[in-house]
Structure formats: C-alpha cells, structure tokens
Amino acid sequence: MLAQGIRLADRYAVRDRISYGGETVSRAYDMKTERFVLVRTVTNVRDSELLLRVRALSTVEGSHIQAVLDAAVYDGTLYAVCDDVKGASMRSAFLMHGHYEEKEVLRWARGIAKALSTLHGRRYPIAHGRVDMAHILIDPVKSSARLVNYDIQEAVRLQDESKAEEASWQKNKRFYQRRRETFVSEANAEAFARDIRAFGEVMYELLTGKKPASPHEPLRECLPEMSEPFANVIENCLADDARGYRSGLELSDALRHLYREDSQYKRYRRESHKRMMAGLACIAAGAVFVGAGFFVRSYGKYARYTKLVESVRAAEDSDTPEKNMVFIEEAKALLPGKLYAYVLEMENLYERGEYRAVVDCGKAVKRNRQIEASAENAALRSEMFFTWGNAEFELGDYKEADKAFSDAVYYMPEDAENLYVRTLRDEAVSLIRDGRPEEADPLTAELTKHQAGKSVIPYVSAETAYMQGEYEKAMTLYMEAAEVGEPDMTRRSVLMISKLYGISGETEKRINFLTEQVRSADGRFYLTLVSELADVWTERADAEKNVTKKASYMRTAYKQYMTLKDEGSASAHTLDRLAYISETLGDYNAAADFVSELTRNYPEDYRGFKRKAFLEAAIEEERQESERTYDEFRDAYNRANALFSSSGNLADDEMLKLRELHEKLRKGGWFG
C-alpha cells in the first residue's frame, strides 16, 4: 500500500488509507482538479501498454457506476485513480436492517441494472465482476444505489478479447455495422451471466433476508404479497435456462417495463391479438371504401410535402437559407411524422453555422416517437446522425460526435460508399481528438481498404500528429489533405493550417495564407475564412506596440468584419469585434451603435453587455472626475457578469479585466 505523503504522477497526493466497498484503498488529493479521489492497486506493471489500457477505462460514464479517472505507476505497481463516491456499504446497512420493502429494493435494482447496462453496453463491453452488497454504496441523501470497485484487470482483459473478436467479426459482416443490442460474444457472455446472477442473488437476499439456495425457494412463495412482475425478473436472473438475461441492457429494459412480466398482461396480449385478427377481417371491406376517400384527401398533402422538400434539396448549394427554412417549416406542419424535413432542417442549420441548434433538433427527433422509423428511412437517419456528429465535432464535444457517427454507420445503406468513408474518417478524427487513438486504429485500417482512403489518410494522420504535438508533421499532412478538394475536409484542414501558423507565431504567413484562401473560397466557407482573417488582424493589432501600425491593423480588421456584416453574417462575435475596434479607435458613437445592435439581437449573450460596460467606462474616463457617475457601467457590468456566470465560458480574459475594473471602482467609492 502507498504511504502517506507519496505523490503519484506529480499530481495525486496520498493522504490516508480507508476501507471502501470491501477493499482497502488510499484516499488522495488531486491537485489539478482540487478534489479528493481514491487510489486502488491494480497489479505489478509488466506491460507498458497496460497503463494506457487502464486509462482507456476513463471513458466509462454513468450516474450509477464509479468512474476510473486515471492510472499511475509507483515503484513498479500500477494504481487506478477512481472517483470518491460517497455513501454507506449496502452490506453494513443490510446487517443492521435485515431486509427491505419491495419499493425500496426496486429503486436500488433499477440503479444497479443501469450501471450494468452502462458497462455491458459499451462498444468494447466489460463486466463488473464483483456484484455483491460489499460493492454497492447507498447514497445517504438520495437513497440511490451505485456500483463501485469493479474488477479493473478483468475489464481490461474483456476489452482486449472484445477487440480481437470484433476483428474476426468484420470478416463476415460489414465493418462496424453492429447490432443495436449488445454484442454478446464468447469473450463476455460468461462474465455477463455472472453479473446478472449475482444481481439476482443480491436482490433475493435484500427482499427475504437470506441468500438463495440451490435450488432456491421461489420468491412468490417466500413473499406471497410481492408483485409478480418484479419477482419474475429476479427469478429470470437466477435461472440457468433461456429465461436469463444476456446482458445488463436486457435486465435494465425489463425493469423499466415490468408490466411485460405480468401473467395477466401476457394473457391479455394473446387474446387481444386473436380479437384483432378477427376484427381486421370484418373491417377490411369497409376500409377499402373509406381508404379511397382518405387517399384523395391525403394525396394533396403528400404532393405539396414532396414539392417542398425537393425544392429545399435542389437549393442546398444556393445562398437562400432563410427561404429554405420557410419551406422546411411548412413541410413539417403538413406531415409532422415524416423524417425528411427534419433532416433537411439539420443540414440547413449546419450550413448556417448554428451547430447547437443542429444538436437540439437531433435530440428532439430522437425523443419524438411519432416520427416514422421504418426501414425505408434508414438512409435518412444515417444522414441525420452524420450531420449531428459534425455539429458535435464543431462544438468540440468529440465523445458525442463519436456516438453520432457510430449511429450514422449503423443506419447507412450498402451503396452509400462516399458517405461511409466520410463518416468513418470523421469518427476516427473524433476519437483521436477525444484522446482515444487506439480506438481509431481499426477505423483507419478500414479506410485504407477504400480508394478514397488514399485521400483521407493524410487528414487522419495530420490529426494524430497534431494531438501528439508534432506540429511540423501535422502542417505538411494538412497541406496534403487540403489539396484533395473534398469540401469539408479541405475546410477543416485550411483552418487547422491557420491555427498551426498561430501556434508557431508566424502571423505574417498566417495572414498571407488566409488571404490567398479567401480569394478562392465561396459560400459559407468564404465567410468563415473572412472571420478568421479578421480575428488574426485584431490579434496582431492587440500585440502591436507602435500606435500607428496598431491603428492600421485595426482598420484592416474592421473592413473584414464589415464584409461579414454586409454579407448578412452579423453574428454576436462580429458585432462585438466591430464595437471593440470602434471603441479602441475612439469612435464611441459607432461603438454604441454596434453595442445596441448586439444587445438587441442577442439579449442573452454576455458579450454585448460586457462591451457596453467597457464603452461606458471609457466614456466616463474622458469626463471630469466631478461629472462621472458610472451608473450605466454598473448596470451593464451586473448584467454581463450574471450572463457570463451562467454561460459555462470561464476562459474570457476580458471578463476578468472587467471584474478587476469593477472592483477598482467599487473600492474607489463610485457605487455608493
């Protein structure tokens, strides 16, 4: 065990030893995140890759499972750094209480089943391996259950075996187009079965106060008043035949829909099916006549809907996004249950750069059960998830982007070769950006099998080099990828080249590169490059000491931002920068106009009120001290600070300067 005072990975300061979930572990303080964590011994280090494989378990996320946060080595021993979950052991609570009521046990059962569903439902599934009362904690406030201390060595082993089995599975099935249910392979079926049976044994003991014997007394005989559906679920967990659940996903689904296990419900379903078949025969003749009239009335709707969506699809490359949205809204109102219009809406929003709106629309479609999900819509759903994944990528949420791209491949038809390659490419890059390059390797291998892979691989390799800090290599590869001509890959490569010039401090080369790219770009990408170029000129001006050059750079940036505004792209960022430059150049009237437009068009964006506060402070500074009030500054600051605190953006240096200015004025007695 680790002695007190030892520091792991120059980050985790070990404090003391504790007994936790039936295991002796060390508590440590994470100096980076400023919170306490738990450190568990894994094994003696023999394989250098084992450290990375344990760290890969940090992708396991769930509200009912303890998270592995990191891994570290000390004196030849590998340690796993885990979340410090609060709560009392279910074993100690059970010893004091004896047994529990069905309602409380059911709540715990659903939480534990959700944890098993999280573990078993991963792309490379893992098992808990230690499901018992000692490894279940009860939250003292919420009274919810959480699984802790899963077997990390077993988890690593199962992941390795699952990867190997998936590789062989690819030989006879289309790559990565796996089933929606858990891939219960030979590698994990036995481990899953142990988890499920152990779950059943825990539930049985909680309800009856005794462990189940072999053979055990049925729950309904021990507890005649117990509900039949919940009892049947537990009996299925303890069964050795086909009634047992194959994974935590099936168990969690059964607990969410307990009514399916009720004998009366099953009997009702059988009888209602017979009645339905007889009824269908009776109404078939009448339906012919009614259907004819319905067809006549509905045909007009379908014809109009088809005309609208085809008009939007035909105008995708045109510069009429507002007109397209009018058509899309009308189509959705005509037939709200059809998917096509929603997919077009997401694509249209993406082209306009409204990435958060794309994600919100995708989530709404997934929640809406009225939207058709027939097999004919598989291609549309594939397009929807592809657009969704790209929006998540632009927002920087690479984990969610990976999930969306995975769903896109699942629904993708066999003949969508181009979209298939693009989706695999973007998922591989998402995994690389998320710090999981080993999971991107099989996707890269699949890309090399396609002719298009020759043009894609430089881009994927560039992302890998960038994440590893090999910027010169990344620059060369991005240059190669940008010349391919595939639109979205070229766009990303050009922006990354610009970013790399910025990292290396080569501002002049960056400006020349962007200026050249602007000349040949069009559409939305043209506006993106103009915005990037304007930002670079502003950064150059801010860094310039010479007053004359500084003003010249500011005016150049101003022209670029005005180009965006004139093109109808007056985003919050554009208006904020125009106001900032106008204020810096001393044109307070123009700055006030831009601030007014910014706060009017984006009332929930803190940047408008931040800029207003700076402007009011600058105006007051030019007045005689006896004439200053700072009332307008104070009101704008309070609004900006409130919106900033709720925005989730904690990296705005200007807001920090504004807070310092506010504190200076407060101490100076300007606010009464």
Image (cartoon, rainbow, N blue to C red):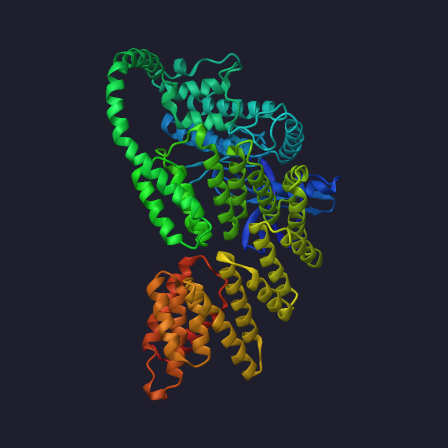
On the image, the x and y values in percent for residue 495 come to 58, 58
Return the residue nearer the eye: 645 or 345: 345
Residue 382 x, y percent position in the rendering: 49, 37
Find residue 443 and report its image quarter.
Answer: top right
Name the residue rendered at 44%, 71% in the picture. 578
Residue 41 lies, with reference to residue 623, above or below; the image says above
Image quarter where the C terminus lies is bottom left
Number of numbered discs present?
0
The N terminus, quarter of image:
top right
In-image side of 244 versus 220 (left or right): right
Up/down of 464 relative to 404, above or below: below
Q: Residue at x 48, y 57 (%)?
A: 524
Res. 110 visible in picture: yes
Q: In the image shown, does 551 or 635 lie closer to the viewer? A: 551
Whether residue 11 sits left or right of residue 328 in the image: it is right
Front in this rendered view, residue 537 or 235: 537
- State the residue at coordinates (25%, 27%): 294
